Amino acid sequence: MPLDSRLKNFRDLSPAERVDHIAGLLHLNAEDTALLTQPGALPLDIADGMIENVLGKFELPYAVASNFQVNGRDVLVPLVVEEPSIVAAASYMAKLARPGGGFQTSSSAPLMRAQIQLTGVSDPHGARHALLRKRDDILALANSRDALLQKLGGGCREIEIHTFESSPVGPMVVLHLIVDVRDAMGANTVNTMAEAVAPLVEKTTGGKVRLRILSNLADLRLARAQARFAPEVFESAQYRGSEVIDGIIEAYTFAAIDPYRAATHNKGIMNGIDPLVVATGNDWRAIEAGAHAYAARQGHYGSLTTWEKDKQGHLVGTIEMPMALGLVGGATKTHPLAQLSLRILGVGSAQELAEIAVAVGLAQNLGALRALATEGIQRGHMALHARNIAMLAGATGDEIGQVVDAMVRNKDVRADRASALLAELRGQ
Ligand SMILES: CC(C)(COP(=O)([O-])OP(=O)([O-])OC[C@H]1O[C@@H](n2cnc3c(N)ncnc32)[C@H](O)[C@@H]1OP(=O)([O-])[O-])[C@@H](O)C(=O)NCCC(=O)NCCSC(=O)C[C@@](C)(O)CC(=O)[O-]
Ligand SMILES: NC(=O)C1=CN([C@@H]2O[C@H](COP(=O)(O)OP(=O)(O)OC[C@H]3O[C@@H](n4cnc5c(N)ncnc54)[C@H](OP(=O)(O)O)[C@@H]3O)[C@@H](O)[C@H]2O)C=CC1
């Protein structure tokens, strides 16, 4: 039976009960569930092999967002993050997207760029033409470094030459290798190719190659998502649906014209994307760098999403951004939980993963905009953050719920209030 990602009353279960429920839905085995329920999912010897000077491990909460439907397929989205209300907001907006068919997505081929910086050339245009004449040799040399990738249908596809006639260190020519990296994030793959072709680039131009490294502005590796919302889904006792839609479009417009707002707006998008990137063992710094560079590509830092109204007055949201995610390579295969995340997602390609990631980003953006354009962010966010505050004040077990309820009821979610309530509860 196909998965139904609407997890009814899931929030009311204990973590162990949630794992049982998901295991039943996705046919996870005991080894899989042990990764979530037992300590030590990442053995220390594996951690020690991943980075340098390891002392231990740092754990974060691992959750799933519910209700997601992507291209007609229900999917549970693993999210690893420290901030409250993100999982709730994503699940909520995915729920509101369902009547409109959920999220429709697409993506470009997984093309990455590697840059080879060439200095010491007095005739950058001449060097450009010389390199273009050598295109086939450069591609062949790059591809000779990764037979497996070629067998998988990937490989170096094209070169691009960017010329900078003047710079503080003289003219500069930058050769880009455009590489189809298939299901890898591709940094190591393209870096190896860039280093391999550097001597040929020097020989062809008489210049000096300096840097040979990928660009995180992965503007040829784009993932896109779209969703449509009828006004009724936003209707409530306090707000008319059409009013909410207008508020969301005004909020988006603010981000589109003002970089101070755009930074926060895009942070809200990354609230959804980064936790999925972490859950799948991918490089979140690379995704962040690509996102913000892409948001500034037109010389003005703007929004990664758009929100508009169609002829029927429905809200239409879109997102398009670089998404260099891998199913293989990096830590995706070393971290056992990263592999479990891929099984939960049921994705078969890096492109499919990238498309789900941007769908979550779009949902997360809407969650924030809907709250900001209506009641403000604090009620929903602080109600969920109240648990952290109560625990910080020392509440344990049943005390946590009691302190949270009292703070939320009085709209007063503060550490000193939590301490006072806890003291009252304990009769101190
Ligand atoms: C937080 C909500 C969802 C509450 O919203 P609510 O109306 O109180 O929620 P509800 O109790 O009516 O539940 C509605 C649905 O939300 C989900 N939900 C609700 N609660 C839970 C929970 N405990 N556990 C799991 N799921 C939950 C769940 O899907 C539920 O459906 P149901 O399961 O009932 O059919 C809402 O207020 C909201 O979406 N707020 C926005 C929160 C947000 O954006 N947080 C990000 C952090 S703020 C930030 O960093 C970014 C920002 C804001 O600056 C970006 C920007 O400025 O653009
Ligand atoms: N600026 C940045 O963002 C930088 C990031 N990094 C890091 O690089 C790592 C990612 O690099 P990446 O190249 O993805 O990792 P890896 O080199 O670990 O893995 C990629 C390799 O996996 C093999 N492979 C097996 N199956 C497939 C498949 N289906 N599709 C594609 N390749 C496959 C390929 O060939 P083969 O087996 O022949 O190798 C490929 O070269 C991350 O850890 C990242 O943090 C590194 C430098 C800079």
Image (tube, grey):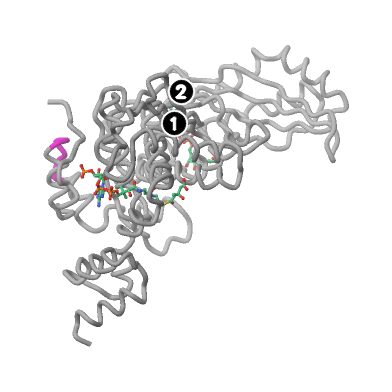
Residue 133 drawn above or below residue 61 = above
Q: Position of residue 76 (x, y in %)?
A: 25, 37
Q: Residue at x 36, y 60 (%)?
A: 57
Say if the magenta span includes residue 207: no
From the viewer's perspective, is 274 left or right of 7?
Answer: right
- Segment tinted magenta in the rendering: 25-30
Q: Looking at the image, can residue 310 be seen?
A: yes
Q: Residue furthest right?
A: 122
Quarter occupied by the N terminus: top left
At 22% from the left and 68% from the top, the residue drawn is 400
Q: Quadrant of the C terminus?
A: bottom left
Residue at 14%, 36% (x, y): give it. Answer: 25
**Amino acid at pointer 2:** Leu
Where is residue 310 shown, x and y percent of the image? 42, 21
Q: Which residue is farthest bottom? A: 428
Mark 2 and ligand 2: say if the CB distance to the nearest ligand atom is below 8 Å.
Answer: yes
Asked if residue 83 lies left or right of residue 25, the reply is right
Q: Is residue 343 visible?
A: no
Q: Which mark is residue 272?
A: none
Counting other residues with Cα less than 10 Å from the Cα at mark 2, is it few (<14), some (14-19), or many (20 or more)? some
Q: Which residue is mark 2?
A: 149
- Per the model, the C-alpha gap separating discs 1 and 2 is 9 Å
Q: In the drawing, does residue 231 fall left or right of residue 164?
A: left
The quadrant where residue 159 appears: top right
Mark 1 C-beta to ligand 2 under 8 Å: yes
Q: Secondary structure at mark 1?
A: loop
Q: Earlier in the sequence, mark 1 or mark 2?
A: 2
Specify the amino acid type for callout 1.
Answer: Ala
